[in-house]
Image: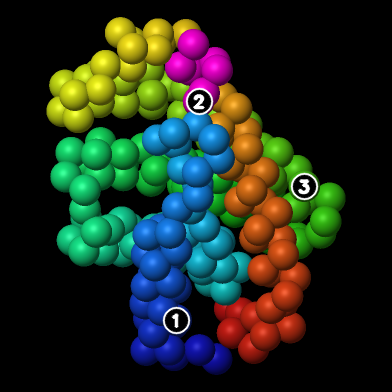
Amino acid sequence: MMTNTRKLTILAVLSALSFLLMIFQMSVGIGFLKVDFSTIPILLALVLFDLRSSFLVLIVRSVLQLALNSKGAETLVGLPINIVAVFVFVLAFALIWNKKQTLKRFVLASLVGTLGITIAMLVVNYYYAIPLYAKFVGFDIAGNIGVEKYLLGMVVPFNLLEGLIWAVSFWMVHTLIQSQLKRYEK
């Protein structure tokens, strides 16, 4: 049986790892839209513990980002968007895959999570990001790119690709360390 101290230690390590992975972002050809791999430790918290623990890792990672690696208004606008995307993706895995971890359910969770973040990011970008980037970051997406072109030509393809990258990278990591995870699970 795992003690609370051990659980908190593992969650702290996963939070720190998630924060470090968030620092290293990868451009996928759409300028300011970048993918990071901070979702992997958050999903590992889901596998090891539960949705609440993975949400805790997400929040601690985000607070560390604000405190130690903030880029001002860009972070203040972008971080909440990232939190929503990661939470939607992880929620799909919690509801579909985590209780019965089969390949079929993993693929289904990946598809639902990817479609979920794509839809969520359309809504979040339209109502939140576009107005705030114009107001606080000085980047007028509506004027420079056009809302429809931005949403359908950038946000949709980016989030479809991001979901695929998150799913494949998590599958690889989970497969590689699955035998080690058995020692720590619930």
Q: Residue at x 54, y 51 (%)?
A: 90
Comes first in the chain, label 3 or label 1: 1
Residue 10: give its label: 1
Q: Quadrant of the C terminus?
A: bottom right
Which residues, given as a range, are shown in magenta?
149-155
Q: Which residue is mark 2?
A: 155
Magenta highlight: main SS = helix
Question: CA gap, disc 1 to disc 2?
Answer: 34 Å
In the depicted view, which residue is nearer to us: 126 or 105?
A: 126
Q: Which mark is residue 107?
A: 3
Give left or right: position of 184 versus 9. Answer: right
Q: Closer to the observer: label 2 or label 3?
A: 2
Name the residue at 75% across, 70% down.
175
Provide residue 78's location: percent of width, then percent of height: 31, 39
Residue 18 to residue 12: above or below: above
Relative to the observer, which residue lies in front, 147 or 3? Answer: 147
Q: Residues within 10 Å of mark 1 (few under 14, many from 20)?
A: some
Residue 63 screen position, x and y as percent: 25, 59
For the question of whether residue 52 can be seen, the reply is no
Q: Position of residue 185 (x, y in %)?
A: 61, 79
Residue 127 sits in quarter: top left
Q: What amino acid is at disc 2?
A: Val
| Amino acid at the residue labelled 1 | Ile
